[in-house]
Image: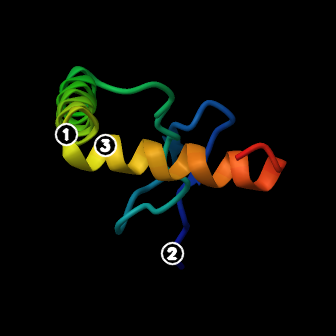
Amino acid sequence: MTTRPTRSIHGTVTGPVTGPVTGPRPQRDERGITTAEYAVGTAAGAGLAGLLFTLLTGGLGESLLNTLFEHVLGLLGIG
């Protein structure tokens, strides 16, 4: 006769253990981000800001903004 181990309400195993005991694993609290994730997010944000600055201060940005304003003014019937 083989008796199976049981878990108490506190998660401890009672009874003879004759094999691997499986059961629910404790839940990990994964709210928030770690320091490494902050560093990656900050670097990505700075890179995107630099790219947008370069694009918008160059000729492409000026032509893009002019086209956008002309289109909006045309939709409003002003331009």
Q: Report the amino acid beneath label 3.
A: Gly
What residue is drawn where x is 22% and y is 42%?
55
Q: Residue furthest top?
A: 35
Q: Which mark is residue 28?
A: none
Q: Camera-side residue: 33 or 60?
A: 60
What residue is drawn where x is 57% and y is 43%?
69
CB within 8 Å, label 1 to label 2: no
Q: Secondary structure at mark 2?
A: loop
Q: Which residue is mark 1?
A: 51
Nearer the camera: disc 1 or disc 2: 1
What residue is drawn where x is 50% and y is 41%?
26
Q: Camera-side residue: 63 or 14?
A: 63
Q: Is residue 34 above or below residue 76?
A: above
The answer to which of marks 1 and 3 sits earlier in the sequence is 1
Q: Which mark is residue 61?
A: 3
Q: Report the amino acid beneath label 1.
A: Leu
Which corner quadrant of the image does residue 74 belong to? bottom right
Query: Is disc 2 surrounded by few (<14), some (14 to 19) or many (20+) residues within 10 Å?
Result: few
Please indicate whether residue 43 sits to the left or right of residue 76 in the image. Answer: left
How far is the residue under mark 1 from the one under mark 2? 68 Å
The answer to which of marks 3 and 2 sits earlier in the sequence is 2
Q: Picture coordinates of residue 19 (x, y %)?
A: 35, 69
Q: Picture coordinates of residue 7 (x, y %)?
A: 60, 47
Q: Report the amino acid beneath label 2.
A: Thr
Q: Which residue is mark 2?
A: 2
